[in-house]
Amino acid sequence: MIKLLIAFIISFLLSLILMPLIIKFFKKKSASQTILGYVETHKDKNGTTTMGGVVFIITTLVLSFFFLKYDNVWFMCLLVSVFFGVLGFMDDFLKVKYKQNLGLRAYQKIIGQAGIAIIFAIFIYFSAQAGNLFIPFTESEIDIGLFVIPLVIVVLIASTNSVNLTDGLDGLAGSVSLIYLIAFTVITSLIGLNLYNAGETGAIITNISNINVLSMLFAGAILGFLMFNTSKASIFMGDVGSLCLGGYIGASACILGLELLLPILGFCFVFSAISVILQVMVFKIKKKRIFKMAPFHHHLQMSGLSEPKIVAIYSSLTLCIGIICVILYLL
């Protein structure tokens, strides 16, 4: 646990040091966000510097080799998040270059996401714990064999897009991701302890230990970023940040066989995606909108809630779910 705390603190400090340099760099490059015209409440954010999420990649990449001995499992997990971040960077770059809120086409994003997800799914299938799926809040696991490939693909694409959709208000995606990762680390530590007490000393224990360190490095980097991202934000994380975080959240769950835990612990991410899906489906069928605007956090904003209050609601809900999950694993 001491190692995890040190990893978190050093990552936070490095992120805190890097953020002013990143803001200065992207301001110099005129890398500013163009806000969609129909988001009336965000007009004052037009021109805010973006792509601050590169700090997650830089900080975690640099520190991972100081805190972790090379292993292809954690490195592949980190690589997936970096590749998703690169995909997001390409999207941000096009938005900045053409001064509009349209980057990569939807099909281009999906192709890129699917390509990364397929490679990662195949890697997991041929790894030591291939097909092992833990049942949340129990000590049971099932072997789903070849079905792990489509499951990982779906989870990875869903997690990246869900985090991306949650990134709509100052500090929202970052705060929820930070709490998620801390809760996830506590839970995986409990799982690892239970496995160790049961006599397990194999690769799964090593994987859990390494992923926990990686999660704390990401968490520390997020906290440093949030010092400059909370309302009113000096910089946005951009798709480079949201896709990177979504990629890591999905990859870390899949690599440990915790795919079923992700939608529970990451309920706020899932609900953001579901609110968009429901809005589109109902509008196509009944030509009516069930929310004033989707994702749901924009509905709350248009209903009169301030951004800090919405962030507090989402963060508190994630924290409560995290605490409940931890308690259930302790029982």
Image: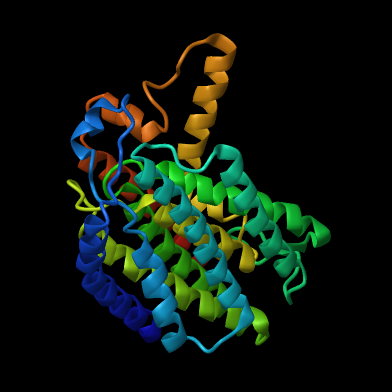
Is 37 on the left or on the right of 273, as rendered?
Answer: left
Between residues 86 and 268, which one lies in front from this camera angle? 86
Q: Is residue 248 visible?
A: yes
Q: Is residue 194 above or below residue 293?
A: below
Q: Is residue 21 above or below residue 100?
A: below
247 vs 132, left or right, is left
Above or below, 274 against 49 in this view is: above
Q: Is residue 11 left or right of residue 304?
A: right
- The answer to whether residue 325 shows anywhere in this view is no
What x and y, as percent, mark residue 48?
23, 46
Colour scheme used in the picture? rainbow
Name the residue located 26 percent from the left edge and 65 percent from the top edge.
22
- Quadrant the N terminus occupies: bottom left
Q: Nearer the viewer, residue 127 or 137?
A: 127
Return the residue nearer the eye: 298 or 204: 298
Q: Position of residue 222 (x, y in %)?
A: 33, 63
Residue beneath the point at 34% across and 44% down: 314
Percent x, y for residue 215? 45, 70
Residue drawn at x 53%, y 71% is 78
Q: Is residue 144 left or right of residue 248?
A: right
Query: Exactly how many numbered labels are in the figure?
Result: 0
